[in-house]
Image (cartoon, coloured by chain):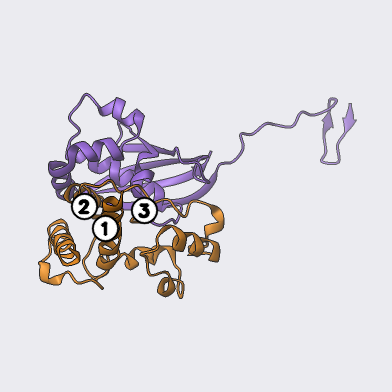
Amino acid sequence: MHEEVYEKIKDILASALGRDPEEICPEASLTRDLGAESIDFIDIIFRLEKSFDIKIPSGELFPGNILNQEAYVKEGRVTPEGLAMLKAKLPYLDIETFSSDPEVSKLAEYFTVQMIVSYIQDRLAKEVKA
Amino acid sequence: MQSSIFGGFSRGVRKKSRRPPEKQLIGSGIDLISVYRVRQLLARHRRDALHRLLTLQEKKQYGRQILSPLQFSKLFAAKEAFFKAFGKAWLGLEGFQKIQCTLLPDNGFRAESLLDDQTKTCEGIGHFFRRGALVGAHVSVWKS
């Protein structure tokens, strides 16, 4: 089942980003390695929802407006409070590595293929339990 | 009449002139988007895109027309530029739906936030530019 989910996500990302499926690997960053832009995130969310028949609430897969309080971002950098918020809301994001240089502008580089795979797998597991 | 240390004479108490309060510039933002890419998105997810990326007022404003890829690109770029002016991370679907954008006749736009955070009291004034299939939006955001 895990392999099936991964392959499906690979196809979705390859199609959305105009890439060869061989270029999609778990560690690949959507922005840095696969060239995703904000319009692509929208496309990816919609495709995942349709493909897996789920609804992805805002802020559950990608941060969205989670860092909306002034205390979370100061001078372009995520504060310790902001990092704690990200860790709580987005358990699939690699917060440890990001926290070494928590520039808001670089946050999108940490959105990886594996992040999406882990999220979808957990969502599907919850749907089965329910 | 009384003499003033600045010279001349004054008649009674001088009223202070009332200037409108200066607006504070919060920041500026730019975004570029490919109309071609938007056309692909709308071809695949038109209903979802219009339902989840437009505010209620925008839906009422554009609901009866067929929103062209160019118009949608402008709205998208304007909202992204507005959000970037605050130096924040990607705004997400919720953010798009909470930024009200009004296209103006002179290739400009006005944007305001409906979010319940520090962006709430801010207003953006911007303009669009084009190069081939790319549409750009540049906005200055002011504290209202």
Res. B132 visible in picture: no
Of the residues tagged 1 and 3, which is closer to the observer? 1
Residue corresponding to mark 1: A120
Q: Could you tell me the amino acid type at mark 1?
A: Ile
Tell me which residue sits at (38%, 45%) in the image. Answer: B95
**Image x and y of residue A127, in percent:** 28, 50
A87, B27: nearer the viewer: A87
Tell me which residue sits at (40%, 49%) in the image. Answer: B83
- Residue A60: which disc? 3
Quarter of the image for residue A94 reads: bottom left
B8, B105: nearer the viewer: B105
Q: Quadrant of the N terminus of chain B?
A: top right
Badge 1: few (under 14), some or many (20 or more) residues near its Cα, within 10 Å? many
Tell me what hue chain B is rendered in: purple
Q: Are marks 2 and 3 on the same chain?
A: yes
Mark 1 element type? helix
- Residue A48: which disc? 2
Q: Which chain is orange?
A: A
Tell me the chain of label 2: A
A85, B112: nearer the viewer: A85
Res. A96 visible in picture: yes
Badge 3: few (under 14), some or many (20 or more) residues near its Cα, within 10 Å? some
Q: Could you tell me the amino acid type at mark 3?
A: Glu
Q: Is residue A102 above or below residue B20?
A: below
Quick check: marks 2 and 1 in contact, CB under 8 Å? yes
In this picture, residue A19 sits left or right of residue B119 = left
